[in-house]
Image: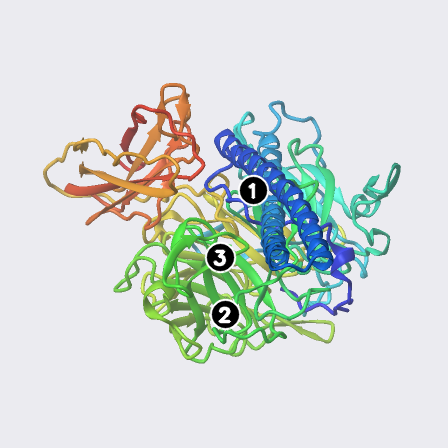
Amino acid sequence: MRVHARLLGVLAAATLFAVPGLARAAELPRGPVTAQTVAAAQAEATQAATASTDAARAAAESLVALDAAKAAATAAAAAAAATPTPENTTAAAAASAAQATAQQNYDAKVAAATAAKTAADAAKDNADREAASFARLTGGVATEGTTEIPEVEPQPDNYLHSDNVSLVGHVRGLWSTTAQQRSCGAINPLRCPAYSSLNFLHYDALGYDVMVANGTSGLALWSLKDPAKPKWIGQVTLQDLKTGTKPDPADPTKSVPIIPDAASMTQFWEGENMTVDNRRKLVFMTRDTGQKGQIIIDVQDPWHPKLINFSKNYLGHTSTCLNDCRFMWSVGLTQGAPSPAKFSPVAVTDMRDPMHPYVYPTIFGADVMRTNTNAGGYGTHSVDVDFDGVAWVSAQNGVRGFWTEGLHKDPKTGTERYATPFDPISYAGGRIGGGSDSQFMHNAYHLPTALADRPAGDILLVTNENNTTDCTRAGVFIIASLAGSYDATDNPTAATRLTRLAAYSTAGKPGEFHGTVGTTTVGDCSAHWFTVKGNIVALGNYEQGTRFVDISDPRNPQQVGWFRVPARAAVAGGPPEIISSDTAAAYWHGKYVYVADYQRGIDIIKLDDSANRGKILPTACWNSCARDTQVVDPMTTSTAGGAGAAVPATLALTLGTPAAFSAFTPGVAKDYASSMTATVISTAGDGTLSVADPSTAGTGHLVNGAFSLPSALQAKASSAAGVGSAAFANVGGSTAPTALLTYSGPTSNDAVTIGFSQHINANDALRTGVYSKTLTFTLSTTTP
């Protein structure tokens, strides 16, 4: 985050958001958006509509009964008044009591009808939004465009680096030329003409990725057909953002600006931690100045990106996709948020229909300090989803993780329930001890693997941002332990502190830089955005450039590489001007690290494979932890060997008796569990045990003839030698198998327990017979 002067306008929530005015009572689909989740949501909507109709009919019938009771009571009262015999008096009293009973029945029926109508509206909206999300799924264009925008920035031939880091290439794309457009809180007087963040999307038919980056001058797109030589193919300029229009909702014959205050825009700011939806080919540029919100760009054709909408929001510093980008959490400082203020605020948006986003009118308080109050005044900065789907909120004074999907124990009630983005379940985290409990926490990464004596899942990596040229006081990179902070088991309180195991700073390290530009001292040292590959962290450190940090010993992190480009003035008839580094973020992707730089644009660098440490996962998990686009290549290294005996390459997988669920009970919501065993033998350097459904009929779902269960079959696995997720995951198809276990080395006769879970909703229509599916289990390796 760059500190930027802000005027927090007081805006009425009613004018900010197009709120449908319905309760979120419908059951939220889980797992990826599929035809099955759309069908299940539609079935629920149909059932809810029927229930609403029945309730309305019952209310109408009770009104007829009430009118009859009123008439009878009136007649009986008149008879008693005219002829006050004991019989008439008793009859009048009975008729009056009957009228009161009829009134109570009518009131109850009306309340039930109102509730049923609300539930039906919610179910219909849920079904419509799920269908809208599914309708936009796309692999992108199948034909390459012909546009290539020329790059004018020279390759830096003066870069400084450790021996094991090399420059692969450099691109600049869009670049702000005016002082007003590139204005930001940077220490360097050049300010921020280039990019605050980048991300990647994969185009199935093209067979390669596209890189997107946003900055003060807009959005730029590059083809990564050759990952070492990106080609600039598309852009959405600041002028495009200012002039984009859409039909006026009040009068479709007229147009209105897509961004309400577009005319006053002098730059786009800031778009850190940019989130994308690869399955729908959408880019979200999060805006933090002027009207806060998310600028939505359609990049189905990356050669011709289109500004399609703007989602007004209470917060707009960073945003992160959740739950297959059905939802989005946005954080920062609030604008026009409803009272009461929330501690560590998070805004929740249903983004399934990007043309009609729904921003929840209630702010969620992440309460990273665990004070259980709604005291305002402390902002949030980022949300980063981990490999298990836990969303980690980094904020002033702490970091806290939340489940937003799946069945988990709610520490508030002690019972299990399904988490949602608008009603999440706290998982772990809080304030960090060792002098960090009152610092500004910038972003976080939950390490899934073990480090030294710390078990898998114990380590949380966090940056603390504090911009200064004094590297002894600047923001640091923190390694913390989550032990004692797990909500389901540890009962953490406001007094709980995560153990700070160590911290890394650039102070005194090779590559440390300090200088002057005119009379300004430069050399901002603060830690910033980072990504992880194995045990090596690629860390953006502002004007200290990119640092590679080995965290194999979590109590003693070591810098193992660095890269920085110094400034150089142009020489007449000689070398061109070179702009210095002011690194926003460093992203592992494929075999390279792509560096988003506030001043330079994007540098592509490579760390020698010899620096590899730890277990390399196939995903560099950050922001939404997109498994399909945040991919990394395994590092390889070889050393001459001596004499010895040969071991034949062996991959062996033996399955036990197939799993069998107990009988499914129609009309009862329940999660059914079953398991089976397997034995793994592998001589490979790594390995992955996965499961896939090869069938094209109801892929990932149990089937009974032509019928399939609405909820996906889920699986997980555990063993002594393998590392698996504690949470169940949907079984994928042959093109997207579900990883169950990973191995960091060879193993013999590893006993594996494979668990299955099948959710049955109360309204699921179950066909008589047997639901089953033949699955394919695969043991694979990238290093045989």
Is 674 on the left-hand or right-hand side of 373? left
Pointer 2: what residue?
Answer: 368
Residue at 60% across, 23% down: 142
The answer to whether residue 528 is above or below residue 431 is above
Q: Position of residue 746 (x, y in %)?
A: 20, 43
Q: Quadrant location of residue 100?
A: bottom right
Mark 2, Cα crowd under 10 Å, few <14 / some 14-19 / many 20+, is: many
Q: Quadrant location of residue 117?
A: top right
Pointer 3: what residue?
Answer: 424
* Residue 684 visible here: yes
Mark 3, Cα crowd under 10 Å, few <14 / some 14-19 / many 20+, is: many
Residue type at mark 1: give it: Phe
Q: Which of the two discs, 2 and 3, sits closer to the camera?
A: 3
**Residue situated in front as seen by the camera: 535 or 298:** 298
Pointer 1: what residue?
Answer: 200
* Residue 577 visible here: no
**Residue situated in front as seen by the camera: 311 or 170:** 311
Residue at 23% across, 43% down: 640
Residue at 80% across, 43% down: 240
Q: Position of residue 699 (x, y in %)?
A: 41, 27
